[in-house]
Image (cartoon, rainbow, N blue to C red):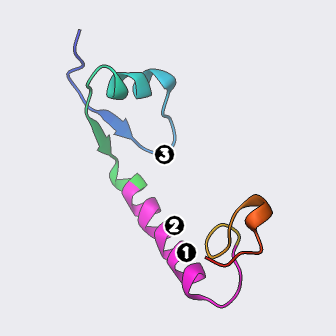
Amino acid sequence: MARTTAVQLTGEDLTPADVWEIAVGGAEAELDDLAREKMRASRAVVERAAEASEKTYGVNTGFGRFVNRAI
């Protein structure tokens, strides 16, 4: 049976069943307003780190053994 409401993506409670419904069942996904604001705040932190001369792991450096590589 098709889902009648979209899966709300809050950043707090995603379940494997929700992922299945979206990926396989064709359910739509909607991003919660609070989750959207949290994403914007996180993006601002990453953008500031990327612009800074200080190294921030995984933002302006590589990962793992490539940590000493600037990106």
Residue ID at (47%, 69%): 43
Give how far across and how far down residue 59 sits, in percent.
Answer: 61, 71
- Magenta span: predominant SS is helix
Give how far across and how far down residue 36 sits, in percent.
Answer: 37, 57
Residue ID at (61%, 88%): 52
Whether pointer 2 and pointer 1 mark residues with C-beta atoms closer than 8 Å, the reply is yes
Q: Which mark is residue 11?
A: 3
Instruction: Please state which amino acid type lies under the numbered disc 1.
Output: Val
Instruction: Please state which amino acid type lies under the numbered disc 3.
Output: Gly
Looking at the image, the residue that sits furthest to the top is 1
Residue 53, image quadrant: bottom right
Please report whichever mark, 3 or 1, sits nearer to the chain's N-terminal start.
3
Quadrant location of the N terminus? top left
Regarding mark 3 in the picture, which secondary structure is present there?
A: loop
Q: Mark 1 = which residue? A: 45
Give how far across and how far down residue 27 sits, in percent.
Answer: 27, 27
Residue ID at (42%, 53%): 35
